[in-house]
Amino acid sequence: MDSLQNLRRAALEGATSNVNQLLETQRYHSVLRAQESTMQAQSSLLEAEVLRRREALVEANRQVGLLDKLEQRQLNAHRQQLQRAETKELDEIASRTRMEGESWE
């Protein structure tokens, strides 16, 4: 944009102005402004997309944490269930052994 401004000044300097160069620089300036506007719009869209994806990532991380907790609870419940079953089996074995011991006496 600065070099374009310098070209404009050069076109207007002196006794005779270079109208063609001035018109060309103005057209080019318009093109640059349109491109700048498009780039700013794209930048805004990208910022919104980055924000949306960042929020999705935060939500996914939260859900992974919840799933990890649920898995841990289920593992703990399963271990407790196995312990109870093992204890029950040992109690039954002890009870049978005691009954068999009493019947032999």
Image (cartoon, rainbow, N blue to C red):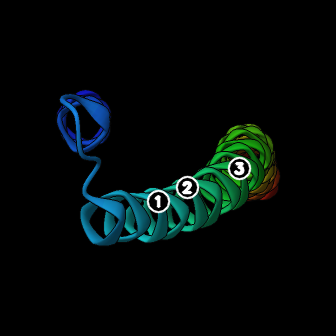
Residue 66: image x %, image y %? Answer: 80, 42
For label 3, the residue is: 44
The N terminus lies in quadrant:
top left
Residue 75 in view in this figure: no
Badge 2 density bin: few <14, some 14–19, many ≥20, Cα 10 Å? few
Which amino acid type corresponds to the residue marked 2 in the rendered image? Answer: Arg
- Please identify the quarter of the rendering in which residue 16 is found: top left
Which residue appears at 65% of the width and 43% of the height? 54
Marks 3 and 2 sit apart, C-alpha to C-alpha, by: 16 Å
Closer mark to the observer between disc 3 and disc 2: 2
Badge 3 density bin: few <14, some 14–19, many ≥20, Cα 10 Å? few
For label 2, the residue is: 33
Which amino acid type corresponds to the residue marked 1 in the rendered image? Answer: Gln
* In the rendered image, the vertical position of residue 77 relative to residue 25, given as above or below: above
Closest to the observer: 47 or 68? 47
Q: Earlier along the polypeptide chain: callout 3 or callout 1?
A: 1
Closest to the observer: 42 or 23? 23
Question: Tag 1's secondary structure?
Answer: helix
For label 1, the residue is: 26
Which residue appears at 82% of the width and 53% of the height? 99
Residue 33 is left or right of residue 27, and the answer is right
Marks 1 and 2 sit apart, C-alpha to C-alpha, by: 10 Å
- Residues at marks 1 and 2 touching, judged by CB atoms closer than 8 Å: no
Marks 3 and 1 sit apart, C-alpha to C-alpha, by: 27 Å
* In the rendered image, the vertical position of residue 65 relative to residue 59, given as above or below: above
